[in-house]
Amino acid sequence: MFETKILKPGQGSHATREQLASTVDEGLTLKKKCLPSWLIFDNTGSEIFKKITELAEYLPAACEFEIIRNHKDDIAKLINIDTFNLIELGSGDGCKTRILIEHFLNKKLNFHYFPIDISNGAVTNLVRSLENDHPDTSLKVTGLAGDYFEGLKAITQDDSKQNLVLFLGVTLNNMNSESAKSFLTSLRESLGPKDYLLTGFDLMKNPKLLYSAYNNVLFEEFNLHLLDRLNQELGANFNKKYFVQQGQYNPITRAVESYLYSTRDQTVHIKALNKDFHYRAWEAMQTEQSFKFTLDEMESLAAENGFEVVEHLFDSRKYFVDSVWRVAH
């Protein structure tokens, strides 16, 4: 069985033009201009980011592939019920999860894969691709396009099955503490006592490594795409050639922060807001943040939000960890 379902809109669905305009207005009127990175992730932005994850110097993706390849048996051992759900939040093209799917099929495990993503196109393509690759197997796939928690609610109503929830990559690392707490609270409320969460954390490492990972020509293209999106959707008149991108590690916030710098004194008009925004020469506008964790900080995050850590799965250099959590009893 291979199918795709569209969920009703929720908190994580594509922003309306009004939400987009309101977010941009709020961010550009701050004393230190700052826009959230989710603004970059339309279809084109997602495609650029996919290319970033394939770069050798972008360590989170390379390390997580290694972890899943080397620890697929450890992940399979979490399953202790005959049939289970493999649920992936923000599945994208499912490239890492395919390693687990192949392994579970080889072990003759009986499971139903639920990729959930706000991109209808990504979910549809993933389901179609899996159907082509596994036509004569026991694999069952139901792709859900829409909000993560709407999808989880629909799946976890049947509490007879164990759920293994994957939240791979560094999405949680990109949330500020308030957003992360809200997200983890909702996630905890969606899970039962026999369920597991496997979630990724980029660990603190040499700042020079962090610098090289976030200062690539593709990262500049990715960040500058934000201006394209504001031009297209809000009628802004940003000129990309008057902005440059740089990422840097901030030891105070403990995050790698990306900025677009205005190379000249300029004024940008945004038609949807009917407002002008002035940029001084070399003024910075923050576009991304990616927090880096120590193990102690990550374990505190779990405990503070009602989870207990079951085990840590590391890459060979301990640059990244996929941590297995369950709801604290």
Image (cartoon, rainbow, N blue to C red):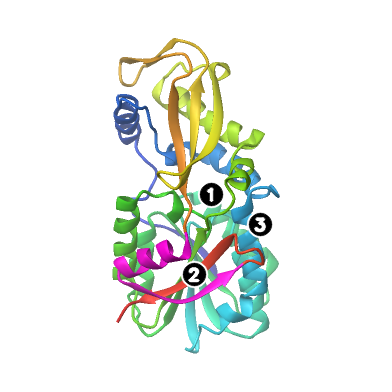
For discs 1 and 2, the disc positioned in front in the rendered view: 2
Q: Residue at x 38, y 71 (%)?
A: 155
Q: Are marks 3 and 1 in contact (CB under 8 Å)?
A: no
Residue 187: assigned label? none
Amino acid type at circle 3 is Ala
Q: Which residue occupies the foreground of this view, 20 or 143?
A: 20
Q: Which residues are magenta?
A: 294-314
Among numbered discs 3 and 1, the one appearing first in the sequence: 3
Residue picked out by circle 2? 323
Q: Give the structural element (helix, strand or loop) at label 1.
A: helix
In the displayed structure, would residue 271 be above or below residue 66? above
Residue 322 shown left or right of residue 297 in the figure:
right
Residue picked out by circle 1? 121
The percent position of residue 34, horizontal first and vertical second, equals: 38, 32
Amino acid type at circle 1 is Gly
Near mark 1 (Cα within 10 A), the count class, few <14, some 14-19 or many ≥20, is few
Task: Kindly indicate the quadrant of the structure image that contains residue 313.
Answer: bottom right
Q: Give the structural element (helix, strand or loop) at label 2.
A: strand
The percent position of residue 44, horizontal first and vertical second, equals: 56, 37
Rounded to the nearest angstrom, the CA distance separating label 3 from label 2 is 16 Å
In the displayed structure, would residue 105 be above or below residue 199? below
